Amino acid sequence: MPKFSVTAVTKDGEEYRETVEAVSRFEVYRDMRTRGDRVISLVSSASGIFGRAQNYLDRFGTVSVDEKVTFARTMAAMLAAGLSTTRALSVIERQTRNRTFKAVLSDVIGGVKRGSALSVALSAAPRVFPPFLISMVRAGEESGNLSESLKAVADQLAKMHALASRIRGAMIYPAIVVSAMVGIGVLMLMFVVPTLSQTFAEAGATLPIQTRIIISASNFLISNSLFAVLLALLGAIAVGSALRTARGARALAWMVLHTPLIRNIAAEMYAARTARTLSSLLSAGVDMLGALTITRDVVGNPFHRDALASASVAVERGEGLAGALHHYPHLYPPLLIEMTAVGEETGRLSALLAEAAQFYEESVDARTRNLSTVIEPLLMVVIGGFVGFFALSMIAPIYSLSSSF
């Protein structure tokens, strides 16, 4: 069915834009008149293969976390200033330069104009708006305090993104060093080793096993360069595909939670994410079972998801959250469990969870800053071992040849 981009004005004089599907332009005009809106412009969406490709890109592109934070903060500010929901959405839709986000907001505006609640309109784009955001908006609509809920959403998304960015930043340095080491190794195998191996062959030297292994790897790379590249690509694709499966995701999560240098950082990061999300949802008025369900989707780690699912069952039976989390000391630190227990006893669970989240976020920040000082000497040892192995493997035969003359 053809799509049309419509710019119209409501009976109250508010201008908005949306994308609609209709059999013809006349049907669009008829629907708008039925609503009582006046059409300003009506443009047919691009057709043909290029138009369909562009529509696909617009619908299935990406929307960054920063854009979502900006959306929530801007909506909160405009709603607090007294603007209507549709007008606030229209302002953001006009200002954004992201074609994907613009197309999504156009659909959201259309949904709100047709009488849907904002949370319902946002839930039609689950790839852009996560369950946490939708639930917070719904809670704000029910409590009549949508602006404050959107501010809490923006703060939550910003803190989660900052936490993940700090951890990714700490991993950039070792990733660059390891990549450079692999690249230099490949270059040496392709350009340095062949010259030395030819010298050994002409001299008839007896080569140790490690030297023969390096020369065999060099010969394979030179004779099958294209196959080696394809093999590496297929291996990367296979690993990526395996990690997308449930079993692969659990294996990766297990490794993260048990790797010596990063397991404490990972445990505290997931504790902070759990505490921050639960605190935001509970403060917005979401019930405990609903908050646990949403947090389970937000937390990201399959083992923590299982723990929160069990906690939901325990809470539904009447058990406290602290008692339910107490069964998972390997996932949730004792401090978080104790603060949860105190919060339940004093009726300040949301506030104490926010304090716990702040504590663990600061701890993760400190650990990630110190991580580079720990990783650097380890990388030097690894690089030294790599260089030493190569040097001994290729220089030892040279010494044996020189001593034989």
Image (cartoon, rainbow, N blue to C red):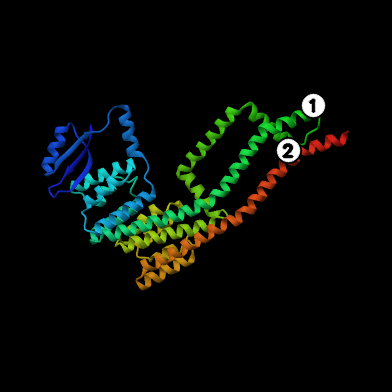
> Mark 1 or mark 2, which is nearer to you?
1
- The amino acid type of the residue labelled 2 equals Gln
Residue at the right extreme of this rendering: 405
- Rendered residue at 71%/33% (across/down): 193
Give percent across and percent down for residue 381: 67, 50
Q: Is residue 232 left or right of residue 302?
A: right
Q: Is residue 281 left or right of residue 305?
A: left
Please tell me whether mark 1 sits on a helix, a strand or a loop.
helix
Answer whether residue 330 is visible to the viewer in this image. Answer: no
Q: Earlier in the sequence, mark 1 or mark 2?
A: 1
Q: Is residue 1 left or right of residue 205?
A: left
Residue at the bottom extreme of this rendering: 346
- Rendered residue at 69%/47% (across/down): 384
| Image quadrant in which the N terminus is located | top left
Q: CA distance from mark 1 to mark 2?
A: 19 Å
| Image quadrant in which the C terminus is located | top right
Please tell me whether mark 2 sits on a helix, a strand or a loop.
helix
Give percent across and percent down for residue 366: 52, 61
Give percent across and percent down for residue 402: 85, 35
Identify residue for label 1: 202
Identify residue for label 2: 210
